[in-house]
Amino acid sequence: MIKVLFVCLGNICRSPSAEAVFNTLIEKNGLGSELQCDSAGTAAYHAGEPADYRMRLFAKKRGYQLTSISRPFNPKVDFDSFDNIIGMDSQNVRDLKTMARNKTDRKKIFLMTDFCFTDKYDSVPDPYYGSDADFGLVLDILEDACAGLIRKLHQS
Ligand code: 4NP
């Protein structure tokens, strides 16, 4: 079993969406016995809350149900529990690297857009203060990156 953790700042927009998109692909491809995922935030501002209502709405329009509840990343547990820890933007990756305890932890950290087939984006931009289009863009990038990630992990 390969375990993936998606990480953004608040764990109410991008990483819960990544979790839902990835879970949908796992199900579609019958990979439930190989791959598993969860999500977390580098900040705890929204701990215990469901995903942002705008993100839930835009995800639902594409057939994704966002059910996860926000939780902060816990370096003491999460670096041991997950094989791949994937930040949505370069600040998330920097924050994760700061929390890494050693080289083994650091080697598990990746940037989501590195799995994209397109090279148009180098981050999943934070939509929190953005427009409707920004929420749509998050889902566009995540669908591309999750497909690339599935292909990469399934090959390994
Ligand atoms: P996320 O978006 O990191 O994709 O969940 C944000 C959610 C909340 C805040 C910022 C970004 N905030 O400042 O509260």
Image (cartoon, rainbow, N blue to C red):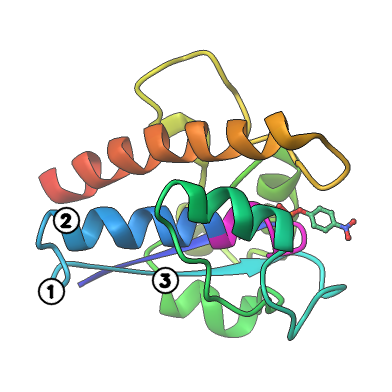
- Residue assigned mark 3: 82
**Label 2, label 1: how many angstroms apart (C-alpha)?**
13 Å
The magenta stretch is 9-16
Mark 2 touches mark 1? (CB < 8 Å): no
Q: Secondary structure at mark 2?
A: helix
Q: Is residue 91 visible?
A: yes
Closest to the camera, between mark 1 and mark 3, is: 1
**Label 2, label 3: how many angstroms apart (C-alpha)?**
22 Å
**In terms of image quadrants, where is residue 145?**
top left
- Name the residue at the top extreme: 120
- Residue assigned mark 1: 33
Mark 2 touches mark 3? (CB < 8 Å): no
Give the residue type that dot 3 points to.
Phe
Q: Quadrant of ligand 1?
A: bottom right
Q: Which mark is residue 97?
A: none
Closest to the camera, between mark 2 and mark 3, is: 2
**Label 1, label 3: how many angstroms apart (C-alpha)?**
15 Å
Give the residue type that dot 1 points to.
Ser
- Residue assigned mark 2: 28
Q: Is residue 85 visible?
A: no
x, y (%) of residue 82? 41, 71
